[in-house]
């Protein structure tokens, strides 16, 4: 393949050799001698002599920033410098040490053939235009093309929140050709440093830690053909310290405060009711605020188990208060009943008995025991 490219570059350079030494002259001769930017350059296939294979596009990128990792919409924002390089023998213009510039810089308006690359999981994207388009097109004398552009994108990132907020998420940056199949374009990662990170990026995220960045291939097969694909894998670990200070410690304190009612006198009903209801409502509000920042999912999350446990303890303390109050009032009612029975005067029992030969009734006064009723003995 290397020999073929050198031969193509030599043949093309002979056509441009005719006294074109300035950048303007070289560019004019390259782009105005029948160059068709709509047709891809010929690739090479050394396994079949005389056959042309796909154009090999080498890719690397510099990730400048990662921000706005959105759990609700399951997306994140990234800004990167995206670079592609390939060989177009039709744009070769010289040989080594021939006195011509080693490379030419083309403006964004000068049309040459470029791969139709797109990001498969991209939702929104923009190229930076301030104060000029942030685009670099460099043509080397051997026909090697370097294309570099700075872009900002919003990419989808399906998240699994079973272990939230102690979870680790894996987000992708997928690159593929939209129209060309593997017969026309083959993407490859650059051999050295395919993905670079801006200094300090790993620890600059507000709520995540960038643990690892790796590269792989994701070639896919559809009804229209097989398409070459490159994938960047970002491993993001959620920072736990924020949730420890904003969630776990406050909820633990609410549970402890609700248990204070155990040391209050059982007769302090207003204080115990206020304490139990207030902590229960506060914990409910906190749980609602947590779920408002997360998508509605069908499975239970680690944070749901924690908030559910806290609510159970607080509600249990409130039930304990209700039970103790009920038992105390019942016990008090029994004591009142006994006290009332003990302080009642003795009942008079009227006994009618035969009073000797006269037959007159005789009244006797005797205390009644239990539920005995007044008896008249005659």
Image (tube, rainbow, N blue to C red):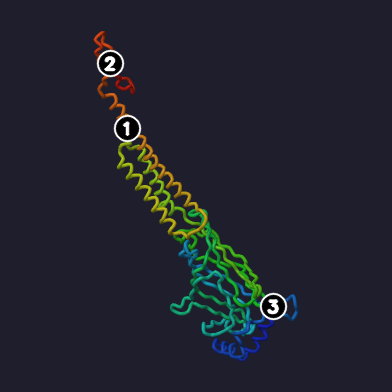
Give the secondary structure at mark 2. Answer: loop
Compared with 376, 132 (above or below) is below
> First in sequence: mark 2 or mark 1?
1
Compared with 100, 202 (above or below) is above
Give the secondary structure at mark 1. Answer: helix
In 3D space, how far apart are the residues under numbered discs 2 and 1 (Cα atoms)?
39 Å
Q: Which dot marks residue 41? A: none
> First in sequence: mark 1 or mark 3?
3
Q: Which residue is mark 3?
A: 53
How far across and down, in percent of the image, does residue 121 sit? 54, 69
Front position among marks 3 and 2: 2
Residue 220 position by quadrant: bottom right
Q: Which dot marks residue 333? A: 1
Relative placement, left or right, of 3 versus 23 is right
Q: Which residue is mark 2?
A: 352
Q: Residues within 10 Å of mark 1 (few under 14, many from 20)?
A: few
């Amino acid at each position: 393949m290397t020999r073929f490219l050198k031969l193509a570059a030599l043949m093309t350079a002979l056509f441009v050799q005719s006294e074109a030494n300035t950048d303007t002259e070289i560019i004019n001769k390259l782009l105005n001698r029948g160059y068709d930017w709509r047709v891809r350059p010929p690739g090479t296939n050394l396994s079949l002599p005389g056959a042309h294979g796909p154009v090999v596009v080498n890719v690397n990128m510099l990730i400048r920033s990662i921000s706005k990792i959105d759990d609700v919409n399951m997306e994140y924002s990234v800004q990167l410098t995206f670079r592609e390089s390939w060989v177009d023998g039709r744009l070769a213009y010289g040989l080594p040490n021939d006195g011509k510039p080693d490379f030419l810089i083309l403006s964004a308006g000068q049309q040459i053939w470029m791969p139709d690359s797109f990001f498969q999981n991209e939702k929104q994207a923009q190229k930076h235009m301030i104060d000029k388009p942030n685009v670099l097109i460099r043509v080397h004398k051997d026909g090697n093309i370097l294309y570099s552009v700075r872009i900002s994108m919003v990419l989808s990132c399906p998240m699994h929140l079973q272990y939230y907020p102690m979870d680790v998420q894996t987000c992708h940056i997928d690159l593929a050709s939209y129209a060309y199949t593997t017969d026309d374009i083959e993407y490859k990662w650059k051999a050295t440093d395919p993905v670079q990170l801006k200094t300090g990026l790993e620890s600059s995220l507000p709520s995540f830690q960038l643990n690892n960045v790796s590269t792989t291939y994701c070639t896919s097969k559809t009804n229209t053909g097989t398409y070459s694909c490159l994938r960047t894998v970002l491993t993001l670990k959620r920072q736990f310290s924020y949730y420890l200070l904003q969630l776990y410690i406050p909820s633990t304190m609410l549970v402890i405060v609700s248990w204070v009612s155990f040391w209050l006198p059982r007769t302090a009903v207003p204080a115990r009711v206020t304490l139990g209801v207030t902590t229960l409502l506060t914990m409910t509000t906190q749980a609602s605020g947590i779920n408002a920042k997360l998508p509605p999912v069908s499975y239970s999350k680690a944070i749901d188990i924690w908030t559910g446990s806290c609510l159970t303890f607080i509600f249990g303390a409130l039930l304990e208060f209700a039970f103790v109050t009920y038992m105390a009032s019942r016990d008090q009612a029994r004591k009142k009943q006994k006290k009332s029975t003990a302080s009642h005067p003795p009942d008079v029992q009227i006994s009618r008995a035969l009073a000797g030969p006269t037959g007159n009734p005789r009244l006797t006064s005797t205390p009644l025991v239990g539920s005995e009723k007044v008896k008249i003995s005659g």
